Image (spheres, rainbow, N blue to C red):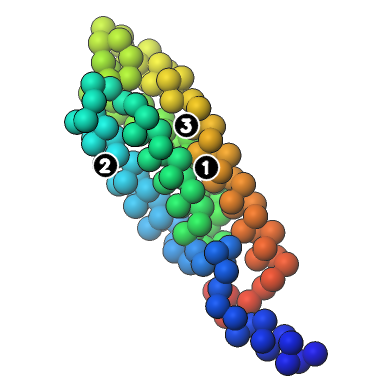
């Protein structure tokens, strides 16, 4: 029985065990990538569109896979806050990119959130589902070298 236990702990980490980055690093990278995707989408088109939505969902999946298990909560609340941040920034600086150009920043922010609600739902659902699967796996398969 000791040999089987030793073999299990000598295996390389699975996808569910890979994430070992602290939340503050993962969140900083996610915000930087999201703002970069926002700028790129605005340069390539008249308003925030599909490129931003796909980047948002991809970033949500990436952060859920990179964060260490102790920091799941911080990443679990990131997607709606990140979407709100982008909508607020664009609502203040360039309301025409997410709403009508003559809308105030509150209306532009709400319109931006509504216009990208599908990306928010898919990104948030994917993030929470991956965090849930990772938590379940880590609880069932603890590693001796887990930090």
Label pair 2/1, CB-CB below 8 angstroms: no
* Residue 57, picture quadrant: top left
Q: Residues within 10 Å of mark 2 (few under 14, many from 20)?
A: some
**Residue 114 location in percent, x, y?**
46, 19
- Residue 132: x percent and y percent? 64, 52
Label 3 and label 1: CA atoms lie apart by 15 Å
Residue depicted at 68% across the width and 89% down the height: 6
Question: Toward which corner of the image does residue 15 lie, by quadrant?
Answer: bottom right
Residue extending farthest to the bottom is: 3
| Residue at the spot 58% in from the left edge and 63% down from the top edge | 16
**Quadrant housing residue 134:** bottom right
Say left or right for 85 vs 101.
Answer: right
The residue at 67%/81% (across/down) is: 8
Checking the image for residue 77, the label placed there is 1
Q: Quadrant of the C terminus?
A: bottom right
The residue indicated by pointer 2 is 36
Q: Which mark is residue 119?
A: 3
> Residue 127 placed where, x, y %?
54, 46
Kind of element beneath mark 2: helix
**Depicted 73 relative to depicted 42: above or below:** below
Question: Between disc 3 and disc 2, whose residue precedes?
Answer: 2
Disc nearer the start of the sequence (3/1): 1
Q: Which mark is residue 93?
A: none
Provide the secondary structure element on which disc 3 rests. helix
How far is disc 3 from disc 2 in space, using C-alphas?
A: 17 Å
Q: Nearer the viewer, mark 2 or mark 1?
A: 2
């Amino acid at each position: 029985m000791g040999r089987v236990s030793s073999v299990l702990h000598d295996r390389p980490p699975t996808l569910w065990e890979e994430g070992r980055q602290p939340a503050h690093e993962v969140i900083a990278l996610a915000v930087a990538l999201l703002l970069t995707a926002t700028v790129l989408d605005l340069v390539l088109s008249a308003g925030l569109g599909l490129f931003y939505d796909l980047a948002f969902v991809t970033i949500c999946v990436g952060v859920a896979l990179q964060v260490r298990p102790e920091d799941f909560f911080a990443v679990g609340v990131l997607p709606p806050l990140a979407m709100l941040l982008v909508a607020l920034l664009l609502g203040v600086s360039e309301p025409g990119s997410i709403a009508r150009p003559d809308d105030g920043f509150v209306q532009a922010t709400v319109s931006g959130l509504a216009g990208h609600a599908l990306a928010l739902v898919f990104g948030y659902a994917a993030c929470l589902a991956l965090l849930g699967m990772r938590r379940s796996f880590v609880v069932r398969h603890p590693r001796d070298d887990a930090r």
